[in-house]
Image (cartoon, helix red, strand yellow):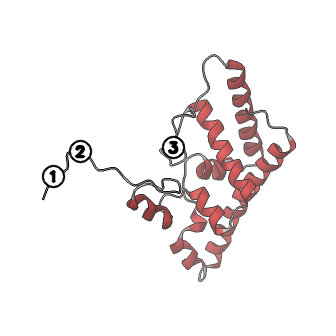
Amino acid sequence: MAFSQRRGRPPVPKSDGPDLGTPELCFKRAHGFTLEPIDHLLEQGLIQANHHWCGLHLRWLYTVRYGAPVITTRYESDSQPSTAPQADLEWQSMREREYTLAVSLLKQANRFEPVMRLSVFNEQPAFVSPTLRKRAWSEPALAHQLNRQHQLLLEGLTLLASHWRSKPSRSK
């Protein structure tokens, strides 16, 4: 039996598809452990794709202005900075104005808190809690309250979607 003269680790065979990560990460993705609350709502059909985009865009605007509020799976590449370069102050001021306008629209409609909790701070809404949904079958007041929370969130995201749909995008 002869030993190999090559040193180091053996070469890893190249796969034809994209690198999906470690087996543990593949397992977590398959079971939805890496999804954020806003992704769960889209997956369950509780919000539409344009609502999902508006929530992520609002988070991006918040991140440009204040920095990342929580650790998230969305900021995965270092090639795209979360803040603007210092030299482009006009771009920065335009994004801050866009954020300020979005926040003022939500505050005028009393929809600021539910949208910000979900979109920016990644808080799971109460109306998707399995235990509360189960209790809602026997408690009509709770069912009404959960439905109302869902409606408030949808109204806030729809307000943002209609606002951003009516304006030409100049974010790039």
Horizontally, is 23 left or right of 153 in the view?
A: left
Horizontally, is 59 left or right of 24 in the view?
A: right
Few, some or many residues within 10 Å of mark 2 (<14, 14–19, 20+): few
* Circle 3 residue: 76
Mark in the foreground, 3 or 2: 2
* Circle 2 residue: 6
Q: Residue reaching furthest front?
A: 2
Q: Quadrant of the N terminus?
A: bottom left
In the foreground, 11 or 93: 11
* Mark 1 to mark 3 CA distance (whole Å): 41 Å
* Mark 3 to mark 2 CA distance (whole Å): 35 Å
Q: Residue reaching furthest left?
A: 1
Task: Of the two numbered discs 1 and 3 on the same chain, state the one appearing first in sequence.
Answer: 1
Q: Amino acid at mark 3?
A: Glu
Horizontally, is 3 left or right of 161 in the view?
A: left
Q: Residue reaching furthest bottom?
A: 138
Q: Amino acid at mark 2?
A: Arg
Few, some or many residues within 10 Å of mark 1 (<14, 14–19, 20+): few
Q: Amino acid at mark 1?
A: Phe
Q: Disc 3 on helix, strand or loop?
A: loop
Q: Quadrant of the C terminus?
A: top right
